[in-house]
Image (tube, rainbow, N blue to C red):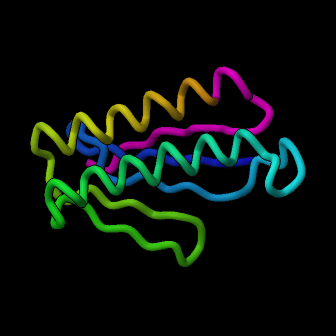
Amino acid sequence: MIKVKLVKNNNNIKNVVIKGHALYDDFGKDIVCAAVSSAVITSVNACLSIDNNSLSYSDDDGLDIKVIKHDFVTTKIIENLVSNLYELERAYPKYIQIKEGNNE
């Protein structure tokens, strides 16, 4: 299962942590993993192409995205990513789980 943890601060998304594998299908055929990867990579690349200092990420143990700037564009892109992840969770609840927390 893919586990997503969203950390918010003052209603802004501060971190998105993604760990695990969907195991929906064999490697190379897993549409859930492919959809999550595509949404995340597209969102991170969009933010960084507009402002290289808008976020940072590490992929040491899963993927940890830290939102540095909460400007309009970065916020909209990250909110869109989260919306896409929630859609995937609704469509494939056995393969992706999202939890939210606050860090205020």
Residue at point 59%, 73% (across, down): 61
Task: Single out the residue that lies furthest toward the left.
Answer: 71
Residue at point 29%, 50% (across, down): 46
In the picture, measured across the screen, residue 77 lies left or right of residue 88, that is left
In the picture, measured across the screen, residue 56 lies left or right of residue 28, that is left
**Relative image position of residue 43 (x, y in whole percent):** 37, 47
The image quadrant of residue 27 is bottom right
The image quadrant of residue 21 is bottom right
Query: So how many labels did they put on this image?
Result: 0
Residue at point 30%, 43% (across, down): 13
Task: Single out the residue that lies furthest toward the right.
Answer: 26
Q: Is residue 17 above or below residue 102?
A: below
**Relative image position of residue 39 (x, y in whole percent):** 49, 43
Say whether residue 51 is magenta: no
**Relative image position of residue 5 (x, y in whole percent):** 51, 48
Say whether residue 102 is magenta: yes
Q: Is residue 36 above or below residue 51?
A: above
Q: Looking at this view, is 84 or 60 the one in front?
A: 84
Residue at point 32%, 41% (across, down): 78
Question: Where does the magenta region start and end?
Answer: 89-104
**Relative image position of residue 74 (x, y in whole percent):** 20, 45
